[in-house]
Image (cartoon, rainbow, N blue to C red):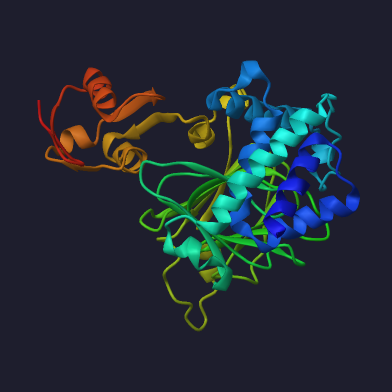
Amino acid sequence: MFNDRFAQLMARQLSGGASEEELQELSGFLSENPQAQYFYEVFAEYWSVEPSETKDDIQEEIHFQQIIAIAEKQTPEEEAVPMEEEPREYQPRFFSFKKLLIAATFIGIIATGYFLFPCGSKAAASLPEMPLNEVVARGGVRTKLLLPDGSKVWLNSESRLEYKTNFNDSIREVVLEGEAFFEVVKDKKRPFIVHTSDIDIRVLGTAFNVKSYPKESSIEATLIHGMIEVTNKKEPTAPKIIMRPHDKLVFNKDTDTEEKQPGDTHHSAAVHRTISITPLPRNIADTAIVETSWVYNKLVFDGESFREIALKMERWYDVHIIFRNEKIANVPIHVTFKDETIQEALRALQLIEPFTYKINGNEIEILKR
């Protein structure tokens, strides 16, 4: 049974004993069976974690710090062109045949059970017959996935990522609705493109954040390291924008609505103003950047109005917030949340601006003092 073969290939790859042919076979299986990627990622991460580092938050922080470390080593000359992938330090680990056998058996049991009894999702059950693979993070949930090429994606609440079943062909393409942090595997022969409603982002290998929620008036892209190219889909012939590390791009969807009239010589300038580039502060640690704080499971607000942060809190906690007082809605907020419940977050906000609130199910009313 091929499920048994998948377990064998995965166990050999994790133990470092797989041949080049076996690695190619495993890669092909994952490409043709996107539903198997979840198990591959779970076991791969479990296998690589030392006993003292089993907590998810520790692993995520270590992983993100490794990304930042690469960014800090780049020089302006290196940023000008796509870099070859830096060699990673390899720490040899020793596995016994007994451990390998146990891993193979355990993986085989779980994988077989998964393929014989797939998840209850109708989308997952019919996935092999669909032209697109879809991953959804509902409200109050954040998830992480591994793409067929090895690229990693962190998906924020109320977000959706789609990619074709032939993802590993000449061009790697995904469609994003919502917010995601990407760590893209370098492959000069196969560019990686992120499609949003209004802009396309083309990369070779880098780490960056994209926020493109349908209900928000702007799209944001924040580059941590590497280099990305941004295209305005409504003006495909306009010059492409090149982003460099610690750049933040904001595309204003609302200002790109007027139609071009005959003899309108100012239209191109108006379109160009829909996109702005802002350098992020250099005097703070990359791990403290507001735009990517959610990857650390943190909500960071730095001067946004209560109404603005309420939209993010709604997605984060899967609630609906209603303001009954405009004065409170416009109060600027400077606060960071990590493990707080919605009630704890509201009590913390009351220390900034006194107000009362009522909770009815997942609906929260913000009232005057």
Q: Residue at x 47, y 81 (%)?
A: 261
Q: Residue at x 80, y 53 (%)?
A: 187
Q: Is residue 247 left or right of residue 359?
A: right
224 is higher (above) or lower (below) than 33: above
Q: Quadrant of residue 15?
A: top right
Q: Is residue 328 left or right of residue 260?
A: left
How far across and down, in percent of the image, does residue 154 sit? 55, 43
| Position of the C terminus by quadrant | top left
Q: Residue at x 81, y 33 (%)?
A: 75
Q: Nearer the viewer, residue 287 or 268?
A: 287
How far across and down, in percent of the image, does residue 300 sit? 43, 29
Q: Residue 273: in sight, yes or no?
A: no
Q: Residue furthest bottom?
A: 262
Q: Nearer the viewer, residue 41 or 272?
A: 41
Q: Quadrant of residue 59?
A: top right
How far across and down, in percent of the image, does residue 37 sit? 63, 50
34 is higher (above) or lower (below) than 348: below
165 is higher (above) or lower (below) than 119: below
| Position of the N terminus by quadrant | bottom right
Q: Residue 343: in sight, yes or no?
A: yes
Q: Nearer the viewer, residue 83 or 344?
A: 344
Q: Is residue 234 left or right of residue 214?
A: right
Q: Is residue 50 left or right of residue 327?
A: right
Tally the marks: 0
